[in-house]
Amino acid sequence: MIQIFLTTLPLSLAASVSITSFLIFFTALLAPENQLRNGLAIIVGGIVANAGLTLVVLLSIGHAASSPHHHNIHAGVNFTLAAICLIVVLLSLKKKKAPRKKKESKMQGGVSAYVVSGMVIRLLSANTVPPYIDAVKDVSGAHLPIMPSTVLCALIMIISMLPLIVIWLIFLFNKEKALAIIHPLGKFLEKNKKNITNITMILIAIYLFILGFDHLGKI
């Protein structure tokens, strides 16, 4: 179980790097009212999305994990996800930079809008979904008992949301300190969003290729 956790940890951490999630989360915390409630709603939405994605992966890839050719199947998934990451990077490099639009400081629809927003961001984030799928896939392929598998999947879900959880907790206990972090970090992420995302996806792709060759016994 420890070995599987160490294998999935880089993937879980990579799945936590969603610049869009950070910026929308920061917007919620900088709103004039209901900062903690709306920030928590985004986190809850992300966790719900992670849980749904986890079930889909376990139900779809879990059966393949018991196949005699499971190593080839797992390697194929690794290579496919890595290729998706590289394709997204190439598309990003070709895409022209659009003029920035003024962001709304408040979403319409109350707390439910923030929950849905948290879910949608996680499910549509090109740099978080591939590593998350691969992390859960590795758990399903380990053939562990139900309890250890559940614990590992829960850890993947929590770690992938950890930056938002940490910032929310800081905001809860020390609002001034949280704001001192959010303001400069938000500006930095907004300015370097594209570069950070592309570098992250390239590193994810490299790691996925390594795992794929490992499944094939080439490493």
Image (cartoon, rainbow, N blue to C red):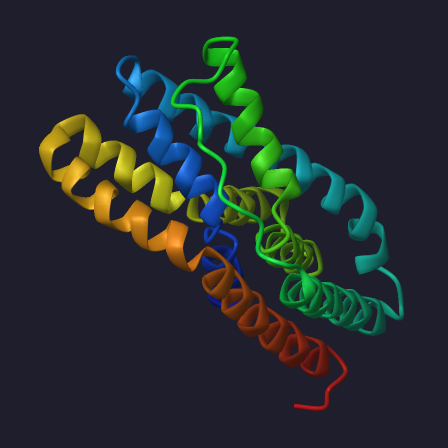
Name the residue at 26% across, 16% down: 32
Where, quadrant-wise, is the C terminus in this rendering? bottom right
Give the number of callouts.
Answer: 0
Classify residue 148 as left or right of residue 183.
right
Residue 215: x and y in percent read 72, 77
Name the residue at 44% across, 32% down: 102
Q: Residue furthest bottom?
A: 218
Classify residue 77 as left or right of residue 150.
right
Residue 50: x and y in percent read 59, 38
Kindly tell me whether residue 9 is visible in this rendering: no
Q: Quick check: 58 above or below 196? A: above
Q: Residue furthest front?
A: 99
Camera-side residue: 125 or 170?
A: 125
Q: Quick check: 181 above or below 86? A: above
Residue 106: x and y in percent read 41, 18
Name the residue at 71% across, 63% down: 91
Q: Residue furthest top?
A: 109
Q: Quick check: 15 above or below 123? A: below
Quadrant of res 68: bottom right
Residue 211: x and y in percent read 65, 76
Camera-side residue: 13 or 124?
A: 124
Kindly tell me whether residue 16 is visible in this rendering: yes
Name the residue at 57% across, 68% down: 204
